Amino acid sequence: MKKNDFIKSVSIMTALAFVAAPVVDGMALIPQPVKIKMEAGAFTIAPQTKIIYTPGNERLADAANYLASRLSLAFDRAVTPEPGDAVDTVPGAILMTTAGADPALGDEGYQLEVGANGVLIRAPQAAGAFYGGITLLQLAPPQAFRAPAMVEGRPGGTQTVPPPRPADEPNVCKTEPVAELVVPCVSVWDQPRFTWRGLMIDPARRFWTIDELKQYVDYLALHKLNKLQIHFTDHQNWTVEVNRYPDLTPEKARNAADPQRERNQTYYNLARHYYTQDELKSLVDYAGKRFVTIVPEFEMPGHCEALLRGCPEAGCTIDSKKANNGEVCPGQEKTYEILQGILDEMLEVFPSRHIHIGADECGKGNWKKCPDCQKRMQDEGLKSVTELHGYFVSRMSDYLQKKGRTLVGWDEILESGAKPGAIGMYWRSGTADELVKKAADHGQFLVMTPTDHCYFDYWQSPEKTDEPQGFGKSVITLRRAYEFQPLPDHVRRINPKLVLGVQGNLWGERLKSFPHALYQTYPRACALAEIAWSPEPVGGRSYAEFYLRLGTHFKRLDAAGINYRRPTLIDKP
């Protein structure tokens, strides 16, 4: 179905659903705010419109600068914010302030007042002011999202290599700059449902340039998502520069890719690249100015073939030889010395409170044969290799806590019991349900990212003929993504606050280009953004109403140069 046909098709659906606010251009907000009230009139934003922010707050300056940067792209003229002492609406201006904000809004909530005389964004913290600015951009015509697309790893430019499939073709922005943006007058009171609103991307299997990662961050920010987990390491590649262990990246590990997997480019693109620490610091800074936290993932104790190619001494000893079956040796002290040394260096690069160690799908086969592992089990009174895995996770969690950080791991970290000082990511739909239930009984904090709803590398439609290849046989349609219920009944009864939030995961095995990554992400990430931010209405969410709002939101994605999958008949309500 062509995009214009889709927009026409959703225009006839207005009578199908109750909506909290009129669904017209500039009011079809995603995610939907907590409260929004239309007022009479409109405010016109032009290049000369001042953006004023309370002085002395560097983070508030970041929020104002970001709003100004988006408007500069829309107008193709520089818009520069300035500090000012005003605490209420300034005639003809946009004011961002923390003065007099309602503390009930929390760290990321805001109030937005658009009047014919000016715009006021008031928030307790700078993050809330930033999100108020995002809502203001969505209230404006779609040209407010105007930006160049990524073409062959860089912003803008032209395609030099013909894309193999439609999903790989950059959605290059064809939106012309405008002289002004007319915004309807509204009052908004808004705050997020969850504090963890994330996506994950996987350069260990499909390498992305720093510019591509930065653009991915921008797209998160435009949807009020605030966490980007980056899966930096796996069997196939170690993509992060570690100065004390240079063999991990420059020549050995990154050039010793598994030849069997490398031959099958359908599954992996082992580009033999890695990120320098300076590049990563620039990414962290870029994301921070958009109120997105980079959560790094360094796989351990499994998924470690690339690590062991560069640091073979961290492997188990079997028959007097070092073995590399993909898991490190939790029995010897040398392993902890290496891993903690790596983490020490990475903590200087990534200020995130949360450090992800993966800890999933660990084979543990060597541990049953390794004398060091068997001795560790005997010394610690561990009855199984599963308990040895739990020992490893607890030890790394304790180490990170001493550094002021919090360990995050996939739900396998809970197999030997709850880890209340860490965060478990529920991903194995069905398989880990009882595990998560028992962990919640012991006060385990969780992020919900189940395969049933949140794996964006899966097929998007059962009509697979016209789709780029998804992972496995599973299908997660747009509707299925939107129908995600992140609070299991058991957790809801015990303590809903144990669920910190939600995340969508985009594994890299099948991805062939950055546009393809975006195609797999959007519009399913739009659905996830609403699940993560907007309160669940009494009676449940209306997919038909969400689908209707997408008709307008797609115009914003077009203006931003975001490639996305156009819905087909399978996606209709």
Image: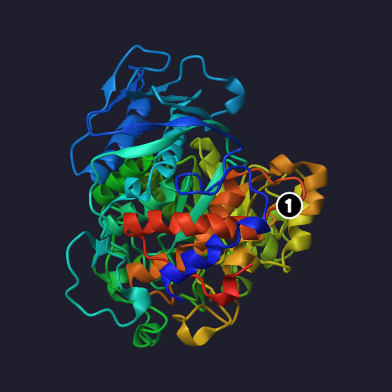
Q: Name the residue that disc number 1 marks.
A: 540
How is the protein colored in the picture?
A: rainbow
Which residue corresponds to the image point at 49% horizontal and 25% vertical from the top-left?
A: 123
Q: Position of residue 13 (x, y in %)?
A: 60, 61
Q: Is residue 315 visible?
A: no
Q: Position of residue 111 (x, y in %)?
A: 52, 27
Q: Is residue 112 above or below residue 74?
A: above
Residue type at mark 1? Gly
Picture layout, residue 426 above or below residue 322: above
**Residue 541 vs residue 249: left or right?**
right
Count of numbered labels shown in the rendering: 1
Inspect this view and state whether residue 174 appears.
Answer: yes
Residue 224 percent across, percent down from the top left: 48, 44
Image quarter (top left, top right, bottom left or bottom right) of the C terminus: bottom right
Task: Decide: few, some or many residues near mark 1? Use Cα within 10 Å; few <14, some 14-19, many ≥20.
Answer: few
Residue at left offset 57%, top offset 63%: 12
**Viewer-side residue, 307 vs 563:** 563
Determine whether, in the image, residue 522 is placed left or right of residue 287.
right
Quadrant housing residue 136: top left
Q: Nearer the viewer, residue 404 or 193?
A: 193
Pick the front one: 318 or 531: 531
Residue 78 image point, x, y percent = 19, 36
Per the image, label 1 sits on a secondary structure element best described as: loop
